[in-house]
Amino acid sequence: MIDLILILGLGIIALFLSARIDILQQENKGLRDTIKRDREWFEVDKRTSVELAKVNERFKISREEYVRKCEEFERQCKEYTKGIK
């Protein structure tokens, strides 16, 4: 009789542990999927940041070039108006 109770107790413990292992495996899979998705987004963010820095640098150069051309144009306009007077 005690043997039967002991076997049933061990069986219940085994079922509980098996269920707990299944739950932990599901959580682990979810965490692995989250880590994978986060890594993918990190790579996208990194590439986007690099591209944004390149575009920002091109814009800065274009803006500086535009300012230089405007200043040159203003200088030429002043010289032209002096020549007309």
Image (cartoon, helix red, strand yellow):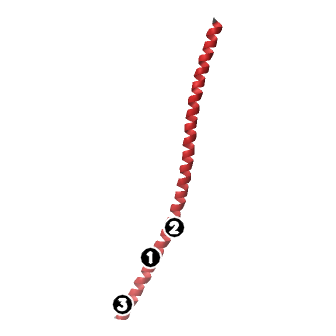
Q: Amino acid at mark 2?
A: Glu
Secondary element under disc 1, as helix, strand or loop, is helix
- Residue marked by disc 3: 81
Give the camera-side residue of 58 and 33. Answer: 33
The total number of labels drawn is: 3
Task: Decide which of 63, 55 is in the foreground and name it.
Answer: 55
Q: Quadrant of residue 31?
A: top right
Q: Amino acid at mark 1?
A: Val
Earlier-in-chain disc, 3 versus 1: 1
Question: Residue 56 in the image: x percent, y percent?
Answer: 49, 65
Q: In the image, residue 82 lies at what x, y percent?
A: 37, 92
Question: What is the number of the mark on residue 57?
Answer: 2
**Cα distance, mark 3 to mark 2?**
36 Å
The quadrant in which the C terminus is found is: bottom left
- Do residues under tags 3 and 1 come within 8 Å of each other at their CB atoms? no
Q: Residues within 10 Å of mark 2 (few under 14, many from 20)?
A: few
3D distance between C-alphas at marks 3 and 1? 21 Å
How busy is the neighbourhood of tag 3: few (under 14 within 10 Å), some, or many (20 plus)? few
Name the foreground residue: 60 vs 29. Answer: 29
From this view, report whether residue 28 is shown above or below residue 62: above
Which kind of residue does numbered mark 3 sit on? Thr
Is 78 left, or right, of 11 in this rendering?
left
Q: Circle 1 is placed at which residue position?
A: 67
Q: Quadrant of the N terminus?
A: top right
Q: Measuring 56% from the left and 33% from the top, which residue is drawn there?
A: 26
Which residue appears at 61% of the width and 9% of the height? 5
**Residue drawn where x is 56% and y is 53% of the image:** 43
